[in-house]
Image (tube, rainbow, N blue to C red):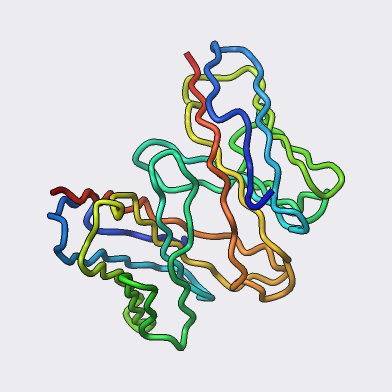
């Protein structure tokens, strides 16, 4: 069964600090992995996408890593801001003929950035 | 519109009533998805549309749930005889195309409809 597990479940950090969120998955055959940011009351928004051959990808202060061998990904947030407070969801896509692209979602890490 | 829109944003209903949730996808997006997000749980796939047809409705939890899409655009998710366990945020997403091995295409999500069944 395809699964995505994230840790920690929740995290509180001070503004300006860095943090790293983890994602482990068992999805096969693997197509890609996305990190989404979901603000309260909003739908998820994609931050990064990584395919099998990519190890690192950055988007501003967000840097995602992927180890396809160990099936692990991380999202590193640098110099956190209050606006980073949100749920961060790891989403893994399996290769699917016909393009259905059914996704497997993690339960998310709830990040709170405080002054 | 620029993004996926959903209505209503919030819906409170009594147990046993029917509800209808609406999704307006991004113009030109042929693929449309419905998900359910319960508190403390990951998004749960409900149904996928390609155009007006639904090749995958495996995620619908019971026959009280149904969805349709007309004109390759707007979709409605209907829940009949609502139960308290139906309370959740219902998210809709659309994608530009749904070709073979196009798993890289991003799904764009709407803001969701928060359903509360009393």
- Seen at 33% across and 78% down, the residue is A65
Residue A68 position within the rendered picture, expressed as x and y whole percent measured from the top left: 39, 82
Q: Quadrant of residue A17?
A: bottom left
B17 relative to B54 in the view: left or right: left
Position above or below: A79 against A57 = above
Residue B42 position within the rendered picture, expressed as x and y whole percent measured from the top left: 42, 48
- Seen at 32% across and 75% down, the residue is A63
- Marker count (numbered): 0
A69 relative to B63 in the view: left or right: left
- Seen at 38% across and 67% down, the residue is A25
- Note whether residue A72 is visible: no
- Note whether residue B87 is visible: yes
Position above or below: B94 against B86 = below
Position above or below: B116 against B75 = above
Residue nearer the viewer, B92 or B61: B92
Residue nearer the viewer, B62 or A94: A94
Residue nearer the viewer, A47 or B63: A47
Position above or below: B91 against A18 = above
Residue B30 position within the rendered picture, expressed as x and y whole percent measured from the top left: 77, 58
Residue A59 position within the rendered picture, expressed as x and y whole percent measured from the top left: 39, 73
Residue nearer the viewer, A27 or A53: A53
Residue most toward the right? B71
Q: Quadrant of residue B60?
A: top right
- Seen at 65% across and 47% down, the residue is B58
């Amino acid at each position: 069964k395809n699964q995505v597990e994230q840790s920690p479940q929740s995290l509180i950090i001070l503004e300006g600090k860095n943090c790293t969120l983890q994602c482990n998955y068992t999805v096969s055959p693997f197509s890609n992995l996305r990190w989404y940011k979901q603000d309260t009351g909003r739908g998820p928004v994609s931050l990064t996408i990584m395919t099998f051959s990519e190890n690192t990808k950055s988007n501003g202060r967000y840097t995602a890593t992927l180890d396809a061998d160990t099936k692990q990904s991380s999202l590193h947030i640098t110099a956190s801001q209050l606006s980073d407070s949100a749920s961060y969801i790891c989403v893994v896509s399996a290769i699917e003929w016909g393009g259905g692209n059914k996704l497997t979602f993690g339960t998310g890490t709830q990040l709170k950035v405080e002054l | 519109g620029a993004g996926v829109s959903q209505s209503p944003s919030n819906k409170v209903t009594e147990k046993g009533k029917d509800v209808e949730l609406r999704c307006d996808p991004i113009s030109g997006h042929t693929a449309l998805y419905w998900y359910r997000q319960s508190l403390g749980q990951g998004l749960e796939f409900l149904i996928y549309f390609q155009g007006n047809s639904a090749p995958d409705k495996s995620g619908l939890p019971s026959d009280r749930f149904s969805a349709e899409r007309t004109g390759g655009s707007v979709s409605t998710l209907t829940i009949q005889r609502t139960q308290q366990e139906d309370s959740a945020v219902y998210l809709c997403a659309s994608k530009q195309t749904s070709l073979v091995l196009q798993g890289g295409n991003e799904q764009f999500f709407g803001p969701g409809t928060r359903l509360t069944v009393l």
